[in-house]
Image (cartoon, coloured by chain):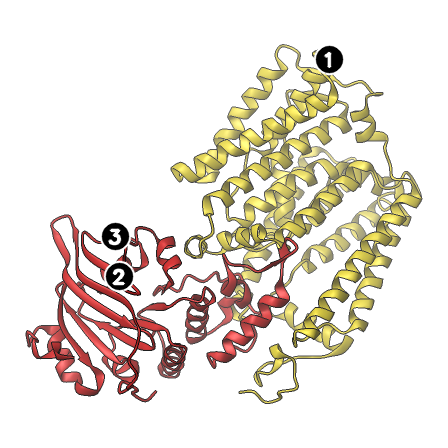
Chain colours: A yellow, B red
Amino acid sequence: MITDPAAPLDQQDERLIHHTGVRGALRDFGQRMRGGDLGSLPVILGLVVIWAVFQVLNPNFLSSTNLVNLTMQSAAVGTIAIGIVLVLLLGEIDLSVGSVSGLSSAILAVGFVQLGLPLPLVLLGSLVAGVLAGLAFGLLRTQFGVPSFVITLGGLLGILGLQLFVLGKTKSINIPFDSVIVQFGQQWFLPAWASYTLIVIAVVVFAGNQLGQARRRAEAGLSASPTSVIVLRSVGLLVLLGVATWYLNLSRGVGAPFALFLLLVVIMHFFLTRTRWGRSVFAVGGNVEAARRAGIRVNRVYISVFVLCSLFAALGGLMAAARAASANSSSGGGDTNLNAIAAAVIGGTSLFGGRGSAFSAVLGIVVIMSINSGLALLFLESYVQYIVTGAVLLLAVVIDSLSRRSRAAAGRA
Amino acid sequence: MTNTGTKSRAPEQLLSLRGITKRFGAVRALSGVDLDVYAGEVVAIVGDNGAGKSTLVKILAGVHPQDGGTVSFGGVPTAIPTPTDSRDLGIATVYQDLSLCDNLDVVSNLWLGRELRKGGALDEVEMEQRSWTLLRELSARIPSVRIPVASLSGGQRQTVAIARSLIGEPNVVILDEPTAALGVAQTAEVLNLIERLRERGLGVILISHNIADVQAVADRIVVLRLGRNNGDFRVADVTSEMIIAAITGATDNSAGRQS
């Protein structure tokens, strides 16, 4: 069985096909794609098609100004979608995120504007309301075993009721433009130097992490990515982020809410992939019984995920209210729920649990907002927007199911 | 896969069950069952459906405690009220349905619930290296530990499940029907693995329906019939006809108790 004792510990099996160097990495990538391990490729291709079509129909679509608007629109619902990614990883669903975000908008407006409470206190209150909602869902799910679909459907109505109660007779409350929260939601953009500095820091951290990992793997006698591949990846990341930022900086630049959204995605990605908690989320989503027998406290995982999901929903509600500079009875209503769930699925998080990534929130929300923005620029009526978004969601779900099938055939499950 | 039941060293007694009784409502699943497990020994528990094999395993795994009788571990009387207690005693149970997460790779499955950490984050390098060391020691034929478990064959999955039980450094490993759904080559692979466990000085309890597998790998065969001991044979002294007779009750085997 061991053919070459000098080979790295993980590549000694003669049956294993492995490639080396930059070309090897490319060939591995090609094989993964053919095996149905599509990752983010379908979304990125879809995004390219969507952008090309809308650019042809309206030359303003890919203008820097419009793309900045697009990022500003994405931040709030994208943040909600991070929470949806978490519940989908468990194989659960949360239909109440729209209502939770609406409740948190209402608490912000009533507390800050009508009652004149200090802003930090009101923000904290909104987030605590989110945590309590998530705790209630998590406890109902774990203590009574009710399917999360039903619990959160109840939550959708119940929390919408709370939102209307908090708003009281005033149906709509405007938040003053000169308040910090509205400034944050509408006016704050990263200065150009700051945006480039952040990118350089991110790429240096990424490259350092990869190089360190490769060195430790080599020391441990395992195969490691060659430095050339790591350098290539880092340069690629630098160019991608640099060009995107440069283009946004041509007009207003990177908005503070969007930067916050990206930061949250990166943090959640770290927690999902590099911590024990993240590993147990994937394990519970893959096989609850196996996770339980492995000694994972399954109930705590469920509760933590529902709490986080509602917390992200509440934060998204605050960001939406800040951007709109108002809260009303329809905040978080309409298509907020559907957009957040669609974003997670379109971005590549499986509805079947156990498979996905925090980054799918970014990709998915950019696709949805591109469609919204493109159709708005064409002055099409909102019914077209609903139909197109619905069709894209169905397409994403079909791709999810198909790639699941071909993964099984190619042994990648 | 040779029979090594003729070992001459005096083995250390790990687990000793005396007069174990378990009732489920009006059904007496176990009445007065005795079982001893020594280090470096494979004990097979055989019996027909309803003989009480699974109940006995569940008592050892802490799934449900016995109604009567004593369990001693290393000579000390002890109780196993929960699965955690069972694990803390050093008993690892590999269930028939494997309990693997299909979406996770081999390393993640091996270390699930016991992940190694370095500065708060998972230490993937250390876990992967130690996974390879463990799999090598077991002469396991897993091509890569970074592929999802779903893509492995039945024998390889069983190998991963058994290897996982060793991560916690147990003294006793219980295997529930490890060869039930496997082909010929894969069965041989798993039986080899069981011999590796014995070489490591573990006490192995093997539950099986397959008399040929049991004869190939076990040192001792304990027959249960209708919740009672019905024979305790050294493999060297027994034919498959005698075992089947004890299982079916054709002999009420007092001669088998001699070992």
- Chain where mark 3 sits: B
Q: Position of residue A196 (x, y in %)?
A: 89, 49
**Dot 3 surroundings within 10 Å: few (below 14), some, or many (20 or more)?**
some
Residue receiving disc 1 = A116
Q: Gap in Å between the C-alphas at discs 3 and 1?
A: 61 Å
The residue mark sitting in front, 3 or 2, is 2
Question: Three-letter amino acid code at disc 2?
Answer: Ser
Residue drawn at point x = 53 percent, y = 70 percent: A411
Q: In which quadrant of the rendered image does the N terminus of chain B lie?
A: bottom left
Question: Three-letter amino acid code at disc 1?
Answer: Gly
**Dot 1 surroundings within 10 Å: few (below 14), some, or many (20 or more)?**
few
| Residue B65, numbered circle | 3
| Residue A407 is at least partly visible in this image | yes
Q: How many labels does the image show?
A: 3
Residue drawn at point x = 62 percent, y = 51 percent: A272
Residue drawn at point x = 45 percent, y = 64 percent: B168
Q: Position of residue A229 (x, y in %)?
A: 78, 71
Residue receiving disc 2 = B72
Secondary structure under tag 1 reads loop
- Chain where mark 2 sits: B
